[in-house]
Image (cartoon, rainbow, N blue to C red):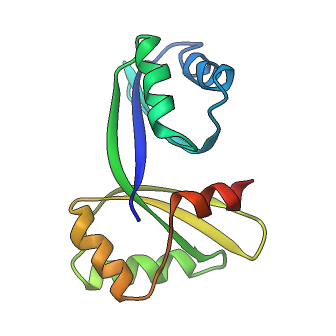
């Protein structure tokens, strides 16, 4: 139930974000969610897409360096305290989060957390044991469509 996330390293200057997004669009790859982190010299574009293998090929053929990571998508209640409950539960189990990003669906009062865990295998087991709603790739595509 882990998802593949693509990380693309970009120079921090105008137009650098548009180029890989446009390349994916031209090849019919749908971006489900993304995150952009930056420093003064470069940025890291993190993407969850509907076809990670195709996206990786498209981006690499266009000259970008692409890294793959395993992440977990968790559905949470989109209300005050929804995120806090999940984070408190994970902290109580000693699960370390490297980073996360989220988006609200604006239907069914749900939000989706995309989480990169320090130890994805054991974290996923904790998530499942605690009854959290793990969203797989097909479900994510259906939710954002």
Q: Relative to 115, does residue 57 appear above or below in the rendering? A: above
Q: Which of 101 and 131 is in front in this view?
A: 131
Q: Does residue 132 appear to the left or right of 120 in the view shown? A: right
| Residue pictured at 38% horizontal, 88% vertical | 130
Location of residue 76 in the rendering, given as x and y in whole percent from the top left corner: 57, 76
Residue at left 22%, top 59%?
A: 118
Residue sitting at 30 percent across and 81 percent down? Answer: 126
- Seen in the picture, residue 82 relative to 41 is either above or below; the reply is below
> In the image as oriented, which residue stretches furthest toward the right?
107
Q: Where is residue 45 in the image (x, y as percent from the top left)?
A: 46, 33
Q: Which residue lies furthest to the bottom in this view?
A: 130
Q: In this view, does 104 lie above or below 49?
A: below
- The x, y position of residue 48, in whole percent, is 51, 45
How far from the left and from the top, in percent, is residue 145? 75, 53
Q: Residue at x 70, y 55 (%)?
A: 144
Closer to the camera in the image, 127 or 18:
127
User: Of 82 and 6, which appears nearest the observer?
Assistant: 6
Q: Is residue 123 left or right of residue 110?
A: left
The quadrant holding residue 140 is bottom right
How many numbered tags mark residues here? 0
Indicate the quadrant containing the N terminus: top left, top right, bottom left or bottom right. Answer: bottom left
Residue 29, by quadrant, is top right
């Amino acid at each position: 139930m882990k998802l593949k996330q693509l990380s693309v390293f970009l120079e921090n200057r105008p137009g650098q974000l548009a180029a890989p997004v446009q390349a994916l669009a031209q090849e019919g790859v749908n971006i489900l969610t993304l995150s952009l982190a930056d420093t003064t010299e470069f940025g890291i574009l993190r993407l969850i897409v509907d076809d990670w293998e195709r996206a990786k090929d498209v981006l690499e053929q266009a000259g970008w360096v692409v890294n793959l990571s395993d992440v977990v998508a968790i559905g949470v209640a989109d209300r005050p305290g929804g995120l806090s409950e999940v984070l408190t539960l994970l902290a109580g189990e000693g699960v370390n989060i490297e980073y996360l990003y989220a988006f609200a669906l604006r239907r069914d009062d749900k939000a989706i957390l995309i989480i990169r865990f320090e130890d994805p295998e054991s974290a996923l087991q904790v998530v499942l044991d605690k009854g959290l709603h793990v969203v797989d790739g097909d479900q994510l595509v259906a939710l954002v469509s």
